Amino acid sequence: MSSTYEPKPMEKKWQAKWEESRVYAASNRSEKPKYYVLIEFPYPSGAGLHNGHTRPYTAMDVLARVRRMQGFNVLFPIGWDAFGLPTENYAIANKIHPAEVTRRNIAAFRDQAKALGYSFDYSREVDTTSPDYYKWTQWIFLKMFERGLAYKSEMPVNWCPSCKCVLANEEVIDGECERCHSEVVRRSKSQWMLKITAYAQRLLDDLDTVDYPARVKMAQKNWIGRSEGAEVDFKVLASGKSAGELTVYTTRPDTLFGATYMVISPEHPLAREFADGAVREYQNASAKKSDFERSELQKEKTGVRLPGVSAVNPATGTEIPVFVSDYVLMGYGTGAIMAVPGHDERDWEFARKFSLPVIEVVAGGDVGKAAFTDTETGKMVNSGFLNGLEVAQAKKKMTEWLQEKGLGKPSVKFKLRDWVFARQRYWGEPIPIVHCPHCGMVALPESELPLTLPMVKSYEPTDTGESPLSAIDEWVSVKCPKCGADAKRETDTMPQWAGSSWYFLRYCDPHNPKELASAEALKYWMDVDWYNGGMEHTTLHLLYSRFWHKFLYDIGVVGMPEPYKKRTAHGLILAEDGEKMSKSAGNVVNPMDTVKSYGADTMRLVILFIGDFEKAVSWSDKAIVGCRRFLERVWALQDNLRPGKDFTPELEGVLHKTIKKVTEDIEALKFNTAIAALMSLCNEMGGKACTWADYQVMIKLLSPFAPHICEELWAKYGLGGLLPAQSWLAYDPAKTIDDTVELAIQVGGKLRGTVTVPRDSADDDVVAAALADARVAPLAAGKTLKRAIVVKNKLVNLIFG
RNA sequence: GCCGGAGUGGCGGAAUUGGCAGACGCCCGGGACUUAAAAUCCCGUGACUCUAAGAGUCGUACCGGUUCGAGCCCGGUCUCCGGCACCA
């Protein structure tokens, strides 16, 4: 009789053995093929690991463990994305330096990761706040600066009054700060920007070369937002006299004949030039509005006429009025539009409100009642040389005409904005730039990297929009690296996304003091074979890191244009009430509690068994007990074992089937059904006298999910050595197929019984067997068989006349 | 509004993509073991009806269609979740 299953001591024991034997350390030199499994490294908050970590980490740990057993040299690293506001705020509140807070949090996270049995290569840990690491973050920034991709620009920014910090567009959700949900306000500020827009087309095009879920590709495409159209120049008249040109961007050059007025954004230079009192008032009002307020006012269009100013429609020669309205955004296109109320909903609403003429130029709708925006069905009317053409043809012809006449040109625009790359906070990478009164912005020489954060006592944010670093005189005041004059350091720091934009490269060669990673190491490990992460990073980290990687490819640091071969995305773990887990809702479940009460192996099973990995799922304590019982039953199978190198004949089929099922399900992220198959196998084995060989199959298949109990059992019943050194199981396809099959018998499409026949029986034999069935025979009596549909090895459907 | 995804027992969820709906687990009911309980093991468990150890009817959000056969395909409707949102 075996002892009872006691997870705690055995989990400690095996975690220690794994550590001392270094079985999970990846080697940069190996005979084996490489495989790089990546998880999104955590932000080490004070709260410790939560189920937003355990779900993806456990899943990828399963994959890493399977790949090792499949004979790959696996890189499965972990690190710490440790710069950021929560740490800084906690540090301020508790009067502990953020570096110390970070050190403690990392230690706690590492312990928890180890307690969960994650097979990370802990010798390759990276920490984005370590100067050895952020030296290279700064280095990449300087390379971008050299090539004009990092620049400073005065522009309206999203300012979070609570975080006292600017935000990237990607961090503003419904007009609120992504982190603290304060309403974001607009402020004009001189900002560091990264020119991600220079990579817009490539970021879009190369989505076709990678294996990402469709929903991820779609979200990135929408965010990049490419549109094709034309820029058109309109002559401007002020008080009847020529006053230059107004260039608009339109995706519908075909509708030019229907343009009855113009609209420019309140920030447009022309609006400033010709503003009267009413216009100025309108400009002031829109400047005060937050993005949120602007979108709130979506339905009701507002605007004012720009007095004395008109434009000439180049197609018709008609003079048309110019309006100022905040439904036109300065940040997109040219900040000015030609309004075609017949065929654009916004223009239509505006025209109705201001009683402007509506001209139908595409037939098919009723422009008196609504804008007709269909581009598939209509034909051009009231449009001179375009009449009778379809929209697509008219677009082409008008664009050509504009080009011939020198009135316009084809144009492509993106919604993607440049990346606001500065934060006015202490706990981030210092930007290695010096402002010199003579030389302007000067890059710190590479030899002076890393530019370390000064260790100071006070680093509270300011209300002025200045970084706390600006108050530290001895750090700020510096000599210009170029001319030696008195100069000042840049005091903004980089956003949290900086360190995470390239961390997967550092893992390849994490201790290299000379380069961000050696060319050799990068060549060997990159690209990442499988990267799993959250949907919430699709237009943030995932897009940013693709951008940085493409830049590094362009300057010859990495050898391929895309960093990640395959990306998958897990669903959220919700609280038991179906809401998002949050401290404020008080519904947070701590995975370490489950580890303490039931063991790490149980916790790992639960988080994967609980539902479809790719979908959101509510945490449920009820799932725990089932997983724990399963492990106990696997443990108890020991009681009935008998020696033997062969499979028990009656188990052979189910063993091969389970090997197939578990192997295939893991590849497809169907961890829940893989575990269900293992539970079924356990139920099959229960009560039977299994051989050691049978049991070894269970141990190996279960080991990626529940590694501790499996090492314990392998040590007793296996073939020696640790499990990661064992080979994964192969199945014999012939043995996954049964000799006989149970067919469903339908009569007229309704299930009436089942019949067991030899596999691949002839159709006639199947029909005969079905007709002989006790339940079917009476239904067949006195009727003629009109038709019989036989689906091989599945079903027979009898249709009577 | 636009673009994605989803809706299946008391519950979490399965279903090889058109072929026995409800795998696996939880809960619940019954039994075994026990002085008893817990634990464990075995059996049962979608709903309804009947002439009831058997059989029938209904059943995958709703309405309709295609098909020998639909959770799956097509048309329409409703609800929920995620993303984008005055992007010209």
Image (cartoon, coloured by chain):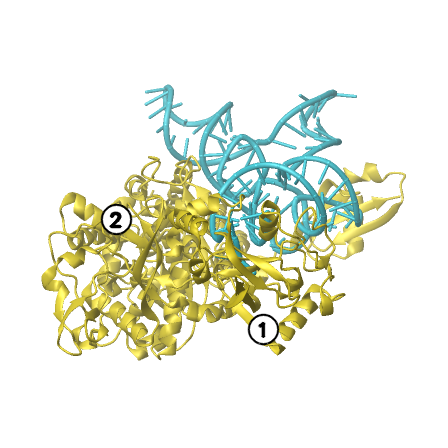
Chain colours: A yellow, B cyan
Q: Amino acid at mark 2?
A: Pro
Q: Nearer the viewer, residue A190 or A754?
A: A190
**On the image, which quarter does residue B33 sit in?**
top left
Q: Nearer the viewer, residue A422 or A495?
A: A422
- Tell me the chain of label 1: A
The percent coordinates of residue A592 (x first, y second) are 29, 43
Q: Quadrant of residue A507?
A: bottom left
Q: Tag 1, which secondary structure?
A: loop
Nearer to us of marks 2 and 1 is: 1
Q: Is residue A264 above or below residue A96?
A: below
Mark 2 and mark 1 lie on one chain; the one further toward the N terminus is 2
List x then y, in percent, for residue A602: 36, 45
Q: Position of residue A236 (x, y in %)?
A: 53, 65
* Image spot of residue A41 (x, y percent): 32, 58
Q: Chain of mark 2?
A: A
Near mark 2 (Cα within 10 A), the count class, few <14, some 14-19 or many ≥20, is some
| Dot label at residue A407 | 1
C-alpha gap between disc 2 and disc 1 = 53 Å
Specify whether A22 is left or right of A76. left
Q: Amino acid at mark 1?
A: Leu
Please give the residue where the numbered disc 2 appears in the rendered image.
A86
